[in-house]
Image (spheres, rainbow, N blue to C red):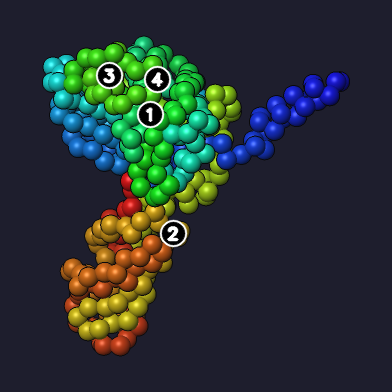
Amino acid sequence: MTKARELAKLGEVMTNSQIGGRRNIVINGAMQVAQRGTSETGVGASAGYFTCDRWKIETNGTAGRATMTQTADGPSGFANCLKLDCTTADTSIAASELFQIGYKLEGQDLQQLKKGTSDAESITISFYTKANAAFTFGLEVYDNDNTRQMTKLFTTTTDWVRQELTFPADTTGALDDDNALSMFLSFWLHAGSTFSSGTLETSFASATNANRAAGIDSFFSSTDNNFFLTGVQMEVGSQVTPFEHRSFGEELRLCQRYYWQFGTGDPQYTPIGAGVSEGSFSNVTMFYPTKMRAAPTIAYSGIQVFDGSTSVGVTGTRGSYIGLQSLNFQPNHGSLTVGRGVYSSLTGTSGYFSFDSEL
C-alpha cells in the first residue's frame, strides 16, 4: 500500500470511527432528550419548546395544528426522531403565516465559521427526513447579528433520506462572540406570500422576507400529512461526514445549559433543595447540574416545604436570587419554626420546578 493510500485509509477510519469528534455544532440532533415531555397537541397555536430539547416551534397566524412527539422511529443507528402529525389543515393561507421547526445558536459557538472575514468557511448541514408523501420544504440559515440569510430546498419521500446541504462561506458580517443569539436554523414547513412570493437566495444576502421560503409546499395542506426529522448535524466545511453520536448523558448535560427541570419522571416527594425556615417563608438553596447560558426564568407548581415533622404547601414567593449556577429560593408557606432546617420537594407526580435560559 502506498503512503498516499495509507493516509487516505487513516482519514477514513478516523471519520467512520468517530475519532475526529466534536464536528457537530448542533445539540440533541438525534432527538434523544425530551425533558419537557414526549408529546404535545395543538402545536401551531403558539411558538415554544414543547418536546425534544433545543428544537423550537415558530409559528404565526396559521389555523393549522399538529401533534408533536418524540417518536421511537428513525433510520439505522437512530432510536428517536421528532414527528409532526397534522391534525387541523390550513389551505387558506394568509400572507403573514409561517410554521417552522427552529434551532438557535450562540455566537460564541460559531467563531470557527470565521464569518465576515476573507477566510470564512462554508457550512454543511445534514439531516434525515421522511414524510407521508413527497414535499418540498426549505432549510434556512439566518445570521441574526447581520440580518443575512440563505435557504436551500429539500424533498421528502416516504422512506428515510439523508439530506446533505452545503451553504457557501459568507465573508460579510462577523458574528458576535457572546452567549446571545447569533444564528438560527429554520425548517420551513408552511409559509404565506410574505415569505414565499420572491426568489430563493442562492447565496447569503441581506434578508428579504419574500425570498426566505420561496418554493416550499405546505405541511398543513391535509390532515394526512406527517413529517419526521432526526440526525441533524451542522459542521464546518463542504464535506459531509457520518453523524457524530454522543452519549445520552453528555447530550442531556449540553441541553441543561438551556433548560432543566425537576418533575419529568421524578417520583412524589423528590427533594429539590434544602435551607432554613424563617417562619412564614424559607430560604432554600438549589444547585444546577451545570452552569446555565444566562440567569434562568423559573417556574414551579406542586411544591412543598418540609421540616422533618410538618409539611406546608408553597403559596408564592417573596423573591428569588437567581444565578448562573444556583438559586436562592424564598417560598411563602404556612407557619414553620424559625431557624429549623427544611427541604423543599414535589408534592405529587404532577409537581415540577423548571429553569429556562433558552435563546
Where is mark 4, residue-wise?
Answer: 203
Q: Are marks 4 and 2 in contact (CB under 8 Å)?
A: no
Labels 4, 3: front one? 4
Residue 81 appears at what percent x and percent y? 43, 31
Residue at point 44%, 34% (across, down): 116
Examine the rendered structure and indicate whether residue 258 appears above or below residue 145.
below
**Residue 211 badge:** 3
Examine the rendered structure and indicate whether residue 147 appears above or below residue 197.
below
The picture quadrant where one finds residue 50 is top left
Q: CA distance from mark 1 to mark 3?
A: 13 Å
Q: Amino acid at mark 3?
A: Asn
- In front here: 172 or 52? 172
Q: Residue furthest front?
A: 118
Residue at point 18%, 34% (across, down): 45
Where is mark 2, residue-wise?
Answer: 291
Q: Amino acid at mark 2?
A: Lys
Q: Secondary structure at mark 3?
A: helix
Labels 1 and 3: the sequence-earlier one: 1
Q: CA distance from mark 1 to mark 2?
A: 28 Å
Labels 4 and 1: the sequence-earlier one: 1
Where is mark 1, residue-wise?
Answer: 141
Other-residue count near label 4 (Cα within 10 Å), few / some / many at <14 / 14–19 / ≥20: some
Q: Secondary structure at mark 1?
A: strand
